[in-house]
Image: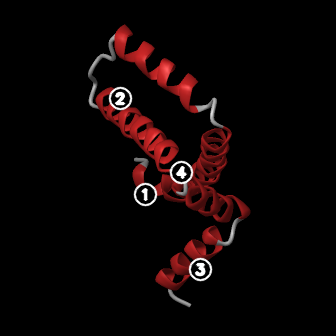
Amino acid sequence: MSFHDDISNLVSSFKQTQEYKEYLKLKEDLKKDENVYNMLKDFKEKQNEVQISYINGKDITKEKQQEMENLYSIVIQNEDCRKILECEMKINVILADLQKSMGEAIEELVKF
């Protein structure tokens, strides 16, 4: 079996996790209510903008922080939105574990 086959198997395995399947179902359910779906989509786009700014070393203003906190407060009041955000957190834990394992595996390559 080749390394690329192993990667393909890892991806397939990830797609079989309960968290992945639950996320897809929640997302499909959320799409049934266009207003709620668009509200969450808007929040996530703004969240990504803030994260990219932070990664690029730009300061996040107090106003922007407050705006994001207010938006988050509104979004999580909707049970479906809250569920999908919780599911994303679970998926992020899985991906962080994978990243940690990969980092440990390549440590010898990057250390001198």
Q: Nearer the viewer, mark 3 or mark 2?
A: 2
Q: Quadrant of residue 98?
A: bottom right
Q: Nearer the viewer, mark 1 or mark 2?
A: 2
Q: Helix, strand or loop at disc 2?
A: helix
**Label 1 crowding class (10 Å Cα cut-off): few <14, some 14-19, many 20+?**
few
Q: Amino acid at mark 2?
A: Val
Residue designated by label 4: 33
Q: Residue placed farthest to the top in the image? A: 62
Residue 100 numbered tag: none
Q: Amino acid at mark 1?
A: Leu
- For the residues bearing labels 4 and 1, Cβ distance under 8 angstroms: no
Residue designated by label 1: 109
Q: Earlier in the sequence, mark 1 or mark 3?
A: 3
Residue designated by label 3: 9
Residue 49 horizontal/vertical position (percent): 32, 34
Q: Helix, strand or loop at disc 3?
A: helix
Q: Earlier in the sequence, mark 3 or mark 2?
A: 3
- Which quadrant of the figure contains the N terminus? bottom right
107 or 23, which lies in front? 23
Task: Judge whether 49 appears above or below 83 on screen.
Answer: above
Residue 70 horizontal/vertical position (percent): 49, 18
The residue at the point 59 percent across, 73 percent down is 10
Compared across the picture, whether 35 is left or right of 54 comes to: right
The residue at the point 47 percent across, 50 percent down is 34
